[in-house]
Image (spheres, rainbow, N blue to C red):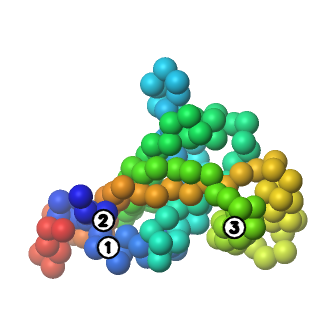
Amino acid sequence: MKTFEGERGNGMTEEEARKFLTESRSTLILGTTNTDGTPVIHPVWYYFDSTETKLYFYTEPQLKKAKNIKARSRVYFDVDYDKWPYKGVKGKGTARLVTPKEKALAYGAKILARYLKEGQSLTKLVLEKIESGGYVVFEISPAYLTSWDYKKYDKNGNLSSQHSVV
């Protein structure tokens, strides 16, 4: 199975998808599964490690998403823009708790740097909670990623001739 795959005709290249995940400030919508099989979605701040092709997020260990992942590690996720031209990346993967604590703190700092201005008090608060165990960091290893980018369509909604099927 290809790790990166674009929607037919309007998908991003692997390079474009990596850039999108690296630069986007949208939240990652995380899908987990309850014990009865019902899906649950959770918006989270994330960091994408383009070199390792892994996504990271933090949460409180007693919340539903953390409990669901500990019981069933398969997750689904989506990062997209809700304004024209629509674009995004979604996928399926396996999540696991990040250890040791030093690694969790390093990824926590990277997540926060994406969403907060330097020096904001929330950064210190979250990192202290990771240090004390009040937050945990998870790593998602994608099995696959698929993408779409509607800027590849012209103003009439037709696929531009300069874009081929990915």
Residue drawn where x is 25% and y is 70% of the image:
152
Q: Which residue is drawn at 58% across and 66% down?
A: 47
Residue 120 position by quadrant:
bottom right
Q: Where is residue 16 in the image (x, y as percent from the top left)?
A: 36, 75
- For residue 60, what is the image quadrant? top right
Residue assigned mark 2: 4
The local crowd at label 3, few if under 14, some if 14 to 19, many if 20 or more residues have their Cα within 10 Å, is few
First of labels 1, 3 by sequence position = 1
- Residue 57 position, x and y percent, is 62, 56
Cα separation, mark 2 vs mark 3, equals 26 Å
Task: Give the distance between the C-alpha atoms of the residues marked 1 and 3, in whole angstroms.
Answer: 27 Å
In the image: residue 129, left or right of residue 70: right
Please indicate, yes or no, whether residue 29 appears anywhere in the rendered image: no
Q: Is mark 3 on a helix, strand or loop?
A: helix
| Residue designated by label 1 | 14
Task: Look at the image and tell me in which quarter the C terminus lies.
Answer: bottom left
Query: Which of label 1 and label 3 is nearer to you?
Result: 3
First in residue order: circle 1 vs circle 2:
2
What is the three-letter code of the residue carrying label 2? Phe
Tag 1 and tag 2, C-beta contact below 8 Å: yes
Question: Is residue 50 shown to the viewer in this render?
Answer: yes
For mark 3, what is the residue? 103
